[in-house]
């Protein structure tokens, strides 16, 4: 279970993953060594899964990004999700409940390439239906932690 200091560390990292250990320790009022130990423990326990930049796909040359919902043949959900997660053009893949059994985020250089990638996914064994939603304008980028958590813990 996370205590208030651990939650504060996570909230500070959510605001700025490049925050220094010294800054964190000053804000949560524990030593640098204690902060570092807590951080390492959060990493080893799998609470913190990594540190990544949040980027603008267009600035990297990806003009077309889509969220794709897939429905699969019975017993093929995990297999399809694993195949999608192995693709170098997906940034997120999850098994879900609701309208679709698998949800993925797919990046492409342009709409023509995106259409081809969707057709390729449709041909995968086990895929019954694919429902793409092409992102026109991202209003809010992914956050690592909901903002309500950071507000409650800093």
Image (spheres, grey):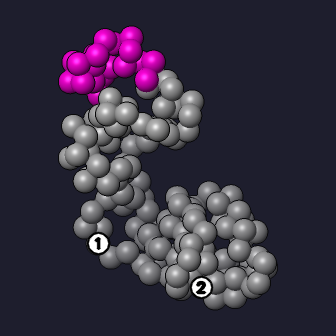
> Which residue, given by chain and number where applicable, does mark 1 sit on?
137
Which secondary structure, mark 1? Answer: loop
Q: Position of residue 65 (x, y in %)?
A: 44, 69
Residue in the foreground of this view, choosing between 40 and 60: 40
In this rendering, would 74 be left or right of 95?
right
Q: Which mark is residue 130?
A: 2
Q: CA distance from mark 2 to mark 1?
A: 21 Å
19 is within the stretch colored magenta: yes
In this rendering, would 50 be left or right of 25?
right
Question: For mark 2, does the 10 Å Cα neighbourhood hold few (<14), some (14 to 19), or many (20 or more) residues?
Answer: some
Pick the quarter of the image with the C terminus: top left
Q: Position of residue 37 (x, y in %)?
A: 45, 18
Name which residue lies at 51% across and 31% down.
43
Question: For mark 1, does the 10 Å Cα neighbourhood hold few (<14), some (14 to 19), or many (20 or more) residues?
Answer: few
In this rendering, would 88 be left or right of 110?
right
Q: Magenta segment, which residues?
A: 18-38
Q: In terms of secondary structure, what is the magenta stretch mainly?
A: helix
Q: Which mark is residue 153?
A: none
Q: Is residue 9 visible?
A: no
Q: Is residue 129 above or below residue 80?
A: below
80 is within the stretch colored magenta: no
Name which residue lies at 30% across and 39% down.
11
């Amino acid at each position: 279970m996370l205590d208030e200091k651990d939650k504060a560390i996570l909230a500070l990292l959510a605001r700025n993953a490049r925050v220094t250990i010294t800054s964190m320790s000053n804000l949560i009022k524990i030593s640098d060594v204690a902060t570092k130990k807590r951080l390492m423990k959060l990493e080893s326990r799998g609470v913190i899964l990594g540190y990544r930049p949040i980027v603008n796909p267009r600035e990297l040359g990806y003009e077309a990004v889509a969220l794709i919902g897939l429905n699969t043949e019975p017993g093929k959900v995990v297999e399809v999700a694993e195949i999608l997660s192995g693709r170098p053009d997906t940034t997120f893949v999850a098994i879900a409940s609701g309208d679709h059994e698998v949800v993925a985020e797919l990046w492409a250089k342009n709409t023509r390439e995106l259409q081809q990638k969707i057709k390729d996914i449709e041909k995968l064994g086990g895929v019954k239906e694919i429902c793409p939603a092409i992102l026109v304008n991202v209003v809010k980028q992914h956050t690592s932690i909901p903002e309500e958590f950071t507000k409650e813990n800093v």
